[in-house]
Amino acid sequence: MVYEIMVKIDLDRLDNEQKIRVLKKVVEKYKLSYVAQKLGIGRSTLYRYVVGKIRKVPDDIVSRASSRNRKGR
């Protein structure tokens, strides 16, 4: 049996490194193309967030990514 931990993320307390880690975990689970499509951003933009080329990750992107991860979709 698989249990997923549902955690509400307080984005105000996360620094950019932690936001990038959240995105990395979601991409590891669902793959880059799928996550980019669901977030409504380009694959190359999401890739740049994940590898750290874009250091400032918008809160709404992390929020949508984490909510999709909690729902298991």
Image (tube, rainbow, N blue to C red):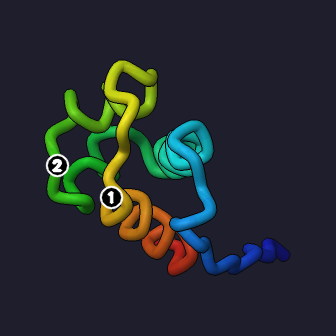
Nearer the observer: mark 1 or 2; the answer is: 1
45 sits to left or right of 4:
left
- Please give left or right for residue 50 compared with residue 7 in the image: left
Check contact, mark 1 vs mark 2: CB within 8 A.
yes
Q: Secondary structure at mark 1?
A: helix
Q: Is residue 54 above or below residue 64?
A: above
Marked residue nearer the N-terminal end (1 or 2): 2
Which residue is disc 2 drawn over? 41
Label 2: few (<14), some (14–19) or many (≥20) C-alpha neighbours in 10 Å: few
Residue in view at x 84 percent, y 76 percent: 1
Left or right of residue 35, residue 39 in this image: left
Horizontal and vertical percent position of residue 4: 74, 74
Residue at (52% x, 66% y) in the render: 11
Asked which quadrant contains residue 64, the reply is: bottom left
Q: Name the quarter where the C terminus is drawn.
A: bottom left
Q: Nearer the viewer, residue 48 or 12?
A: 12
Position of residue 27 relative to residue 73, above or below, is above
- Which residue was labeled with disc 1? 61
Instruction: From the top left corner, tell me how far across and down residue 18 is, in percent.
Output: 61, 45
- Residue type at mark 2 is Ile
